[in-house]
Structures are given as structure tokens and as C-alpha cells.
Image: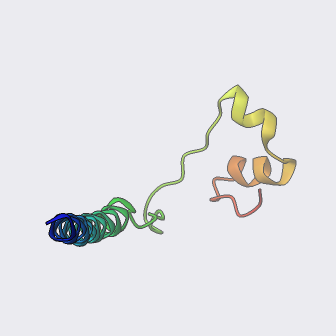
Amino acid sequence: MNGIRKTVAAATIAGSMLVGGVIGAAIYSVSVITAAAATTAASPSPTTPSATTPFVSNETAAHEATESAAREAQENAGIRPTVP
């Protein structure tokens, strides 16, 4: 009877490992699909202003301190800046 109990215990352990592996794989695949769907839906396409959108210069002190003279000249001329 001792041999039968060992066999039943081994079969129970093997069965539980198999079921656990299947459940783990199912949960993993669902999480991968959800993550892939979330990243594609959450990444908006970059918007660029159209040619008809009027340009408005950013004249805040923090912005002005970091921009080059060429960019400031373009902003003062009413041209959308093309230089950093």
C-alpha cells in the first residue's frame, strides 16, 4: 500500500504542476496582450501645427533664457522657428 500512496502523491504533484503551468501561461498571455494594446492605444501621434495655424512666440523669461539669437530673430519676424 505504501507504493500506491507514493504513486498517487507523485501523480497529484505532477497534475498540480501541469495545471499551474497552464494557468500561469494563460495569465501571462493575457497580460502581454493587454500591455501591447495599452501601449499602442496610449501613444498618440505627434501633432504638428498646420501651415494655417498662426505662430505665437513664447516670451516667458525661462524660455527666453534658453533660446539662441537666431531663434529669437525668427520669432520676432513672426516666422515659425527652424533653429534651436
Position of the C terminus, as image quadrant, is: bottom right
Residue 31 locus on image (x, y percent) = 29, 63
Q: Residue lying furthest top in this view?
A: 61
Q: Residue at x 28, y 69 (%)?
A: 21
81 left or right of 34? right
Residue 49 locus on image (x, y percent) = 47, 62
Residue 79 locus on image (x, y percent) = 65, 58
* Residue nearest the observer in this picture, 62 or 36: 36
41 left or right of 43? left
- Place residue 58 in its image quadrant: top right
* Residue nearest the observer in this picture, 59 or 34: 34
Q: Would you place residue 73 above or below residue 61 in this image?
A: below
* Residue nearest the observer in this picture, 23 or 42: 23
Q: Residue lying furthest front in this view?
A: 1
Q: Would you place residue 78 above or below residue 49 in this image?
A: above
* Residue nearest the observer in this picture, 6 or 50: 6
Position of the N terminus, as image quadrant, is: bottom left
Q: Residue at x 63, y 53 (%)?
A: 78
Numbered marks: total: 0
Q: Residue at x 48, y 69 (%)?
A: 51
Q: Residue at x 41, y 67 (%)?
A: 45
